[in-house]
Image: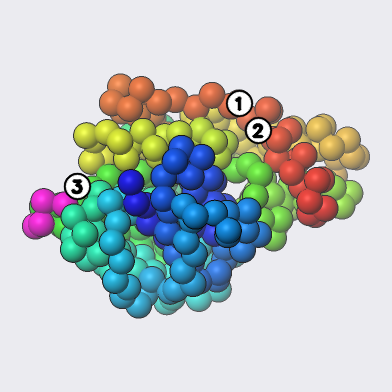
Amino acid sequence: MRNIVTGGAGFIGSHLIDSLIINGEDVICIDNFSSGLEKNIEHWINNSKFKLINHDIINPIELEADRIWHLACPASISEYQKDPIKTSKINFIGTLNMLELARKSEAKFLLASSSEVYGDPTEHPQKENYWGSVNSIGVRSCYDEGKRFAESLTFDFARTFNLDIKIARIFNIYGPRTRSDDGRVISNFISQALRKEKFTIYGDGTQTRSFCFITDLINGLTKLMNSQNKGPVNLGNPEEINIFDLASLINDKVGNKFELIYYPLPENDPSRRKPDITLAKSSLFWSPKINLSEGINQTIHFFKENNLS
């Protein structure tokens, strides 16, 4: 089985590649290293089952594949807001190019969408049939609306060309290989704790998130690709926690004096985020196995082992 993984040098993509190659699959990794890191995949460079192509998916590419895992797109706010027009291009033109490649190759196509399609939700927890509450002209819209349009385009290809598609709506993911400078809350808090700095809290800290460990996500993506379900399917951990309690948990594990500094909440930052994973449980027989405490332990160990802070 020949797999293409776009964004394969990124956090999620590199873990997916590990799983595919360990299970005997051939992998072509496409990445332009705008946010991915070569060290995430360097252990496969000389492996006969692995091929790396440095390429920007905004430009078409001709390849053959049986399955395309389309993960390429900066996912942290600090990354996708650096160049919001480029982020929109990745979500539209990049997805279009990969869908065209899937059509020509008659390949299965999996889109890594996001819980951000739900915006600042009025429904809690969020089910797949909830249409969301997104500000289409806000500073986050290049990503939020970008993922919404990528989903629309993917389903149009399925309806028009009978393409075998899968859509995963991914909730907050964390674990080893998270970049210390990516601006996401768990990496921020771990870095600040290791540097013995005050924790940066945006808003009053009562906003919630639901964090899913990376190995659980990879298992879910694999089950979705191998299923008959087109999606969208929520993949996330419904273990909800507010930001203040998350900071306290990480601080307790690192062992610092607990000090906070507060900043205004960013524009359109969701107040609550929790997946309803009933569909994933019933159709994929999937649910997360790693609880937040255990996952945080593994992530802190990775940061310490790699001198990240």
When asked about the image quadrant of residue 126, the answer is top left
Identify the disc placed on residue 291. Answer: 1
| Mark 3 or 2, closer to the camera | 3
179 or 115, nearer to the observer: 179
Give the residue displayed 55% in from the left and 40% down from the top. Answer: 214
Q: Is residue 139 visible?
A: no
Work out how far the residue at label 1 is from the one at label 3, CA to CA, in angstroms: 33 Å
Q: Is the stretch drawn in magenta largely helix, strand or loop?
A: loop
To which residue does mark 3 refer?
164
Name the secondary structure under disc 1: loop
For the residues labelled 1 and 3, say whether their Cβ atoms are less than 8 Å apart: no
Work out how far the residue at label 3 is from the one at label 2, CA to CA, in angstroms: 33 Å
7 or 53, nearer to the observer: 53
To which residue does mark 2 refer?
295
- Dot 1 or dot 3: first in sequence order is 3
- Dot 3 or dot 2: first in sequence order is 3
| Mark 1 or 3, closer to the camera | 3
What colouring style does the render use?
rainbow
Vertical placement of residue 206 versus 48, above or below = above
Give the residue displayed 30% in from the left and 36% down from the top. Answer: 226
Vertical placement of residue 101 versus 196, above or below = below
